[in-house]
Image (tube, rainbow, N blue to C red):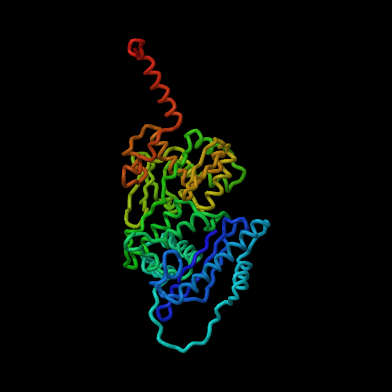
């Protein structure tokens, strides 16, 4: 449960309305799978310079600080008491119930818009949503629609966390170079933000992507952005398939024609290694014939500027799939592939047990299960890179075949298989034992 008091962005004659926010997503009184929140004005205003980091009015605002702070303390006590009583009685509290209790106990009423005299309004700063819309419009001729959509979840989560927030509100304290506002938002994302699967709390890598996109909006607006650093993104270990497992999947009968189609797309990617975007945009003309061999040739584009030409010779399995579909793989949406390839892998009996580790802020989330539960479209690209290294291709060759601009990226695929690692460990100690003598030990 978190209770916050904050100042509304819009001020009248320099005085900002004070608002209260209560969240209890992980509280026992919350409905499972929901992120309940209540926001309401406390019908008090304060000059921004008199508002402290403790979310109270400074004593410099003589004559008003004591009365306002008492009201804020009473509001907080009412909310805490209501939720504690509900937890004790094993009851659920809805946002409507909490709002009604606060208004009733403190004899507050919702602010009602009253007619005002029309006066020239002071220019207001654009909200994060408005800046994001302007950014998308500015770059729509340069970037793809899919790339531009990356700012949409930022707007959604900021509106859920604190409606009407501006980029200026996020700027850090000049002394500490930290922004408590952004830190609170990141805490909200990790602990309370709803996920697509109905759960609560986003993974650290998702939070990291949002921070990087937020930096772009700050830079686009001409505001300082270097202070906002991504401290959440971590490298996810993806378990690739063994060659025998790829062939097992390729040769296994599928229960439906659709799963057979998805399986063929995935296996083709295991032998060629394109990213999903390139896989979906492939044309029959992307395979050319040179010196009796079939070469897949395409331009890989990741990010905004870097364009890399990739050429991969087709193995007989990949060539068979390509010719069978006439070069038109008809790749569906990524979500469809990720759902269907799990069913195809299950039908093929890919049941090797694996451990998946994810990070959500300070929480380490471990999950064990059969391989088919964790397989995704992107696993095919990792499988391609790893199989090349298993087949004794050097890093430079793998780098060119995968379109990596830096060899450091390719080195991630150079992690040896567990079987090779165990064999190397055993061989090392056997060599030491063979060279060991009683005299040397003495």
**Image check: 55 left or right of 91?**
left
Rendered position, 2 above or below 324:
below
What residue is shown at x 63% (from left), y 64% (from top)? 94
Q: Quadrant of the N terminus?
A: bottom right
Judged from this view, the residue extending furthest toward the top is: 439
How many labels sit on residues? 0
User: Could you say where residue 354 lies in the image, as x and y percent from the top left?
Assistant: 52, 37
Residue 319 visible to an observer of this rendering: no
Q: Nearer the viewer, residue 417 or 4?
A: 4
User: Could you say where residue 123 lies in the image, as x and y percent from the top left?
Assistant: 38, 79
Q: Quadrant of the C terminus?
A: top left
Residue 164 visible to an observer of this rendering: yes
**Image check: 427 left or right of 342?**
left
Q: Quadrant of residue 99?
A: bottom right
Rendered position, 109 above or below 357:
below
Q: Nearer the viewer, residue 62 or 180?
A: 62
What residue is shown at x 44% (from left), y 55% (from top)? 207
User: Could you say where residue 119 lies in the image, as x and y percent from the top left?
Assistant: 42, 87
Judged from this view, the residue extending furthest toward the bottom is: 117
Q: Nearer the viewer, residue 129 or 387?
A: 129
User: Could you say where residue 304 lies in the image, as x and y percent from the top left?
Assistant: 35, 57
What residue is shown at x 42% (from left), y 29% (from top)? 421
């Amino acid at each position: 449960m978190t209770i916050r008091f904050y100042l509304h962005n819009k001020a009248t004659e320099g005085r900002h309305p004070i608002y209260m926010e209560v969240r209890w997503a992980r509280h026992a009184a919350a409905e499972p799978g929901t992120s309940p929140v209540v926001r309401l004005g406390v019908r008090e205003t304060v000059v921004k310079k008199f508002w402290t980091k403790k979310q109270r009015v400074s004593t410099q605002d003589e004559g008003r600080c004591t009365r306002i702070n008492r009201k804020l303390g009473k509001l907080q006590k009412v909310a805490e008491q209501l939720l504690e009583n509900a937890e004790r009685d094993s009851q659920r509290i809805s946002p409507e119930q909490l709002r009604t209790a606060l208004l009733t106990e403190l004899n507050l009423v919702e602010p009602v818009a009253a007619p005002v005299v029309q006066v020239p309004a002071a220019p207001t700063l654009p909200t994060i949503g408005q800046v994001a819309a302007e950014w998308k419009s500015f770059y729509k001729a340069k970037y793809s629609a899919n790339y531009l959509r990356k700012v949409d979840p930022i707007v959604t989560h900021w509106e859920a966390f604190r409606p009407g927030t501006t980029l200026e509100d996020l700027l850090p304290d000049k002394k500490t170079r930290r922004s408590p506002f952004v830190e609170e938002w990141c805490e909200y994302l990790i602990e309370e933000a709803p996920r697509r699967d109905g759960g609560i709390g986003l993974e650290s890598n998702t939070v990291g992507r949002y921070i990087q996109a937020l930096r772009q909006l700050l830079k686009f607006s001409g505001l300082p952005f270097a202070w906002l650093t991504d401290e959440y993104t971590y490298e996810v270990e993806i378990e690739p398939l063994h060659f025998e497992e790829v062939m097992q999947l390729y040769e296994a009968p599928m229960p439906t024609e659709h799963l057979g189609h998805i399986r063929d797309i995935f296996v083709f990617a295991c032998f060629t290694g394109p990213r999903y975007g390139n896989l979906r945009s492939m044309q029959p003309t992307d395979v050319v014939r040179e010196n009796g061999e079939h070469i897949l040739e395409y331009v890989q584009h990741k990010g905004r500027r870097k364009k890399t030409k990739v050429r991969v010779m087709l193995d007989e399995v990949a060539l068979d799939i390509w010719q069978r579909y006439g070069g038109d793989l008809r790749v569906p949406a990524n979500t469809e592939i990720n759902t269907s390839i799990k069913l195809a892998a299950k039908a093929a009996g890919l049941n090797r047990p694996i451990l998946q580790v994810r990070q959500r802020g300070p929480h380490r989330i471990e999950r064990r299960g059969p391989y088919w539960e964790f397989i995704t479209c992107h696993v095919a690209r990792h499988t391609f890179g790893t199989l090349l290294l298993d087949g004794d291709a050097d890093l430079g060759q793998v780098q060119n075949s995968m379109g990596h601009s830096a060899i450091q990226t390719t080195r991630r695929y150079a992690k040896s298989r567990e079987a090779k690692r165990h064999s190397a460990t055993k061989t090392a100690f056997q060599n030491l034992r063979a060279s060991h003598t009683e005299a040397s030990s003495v």
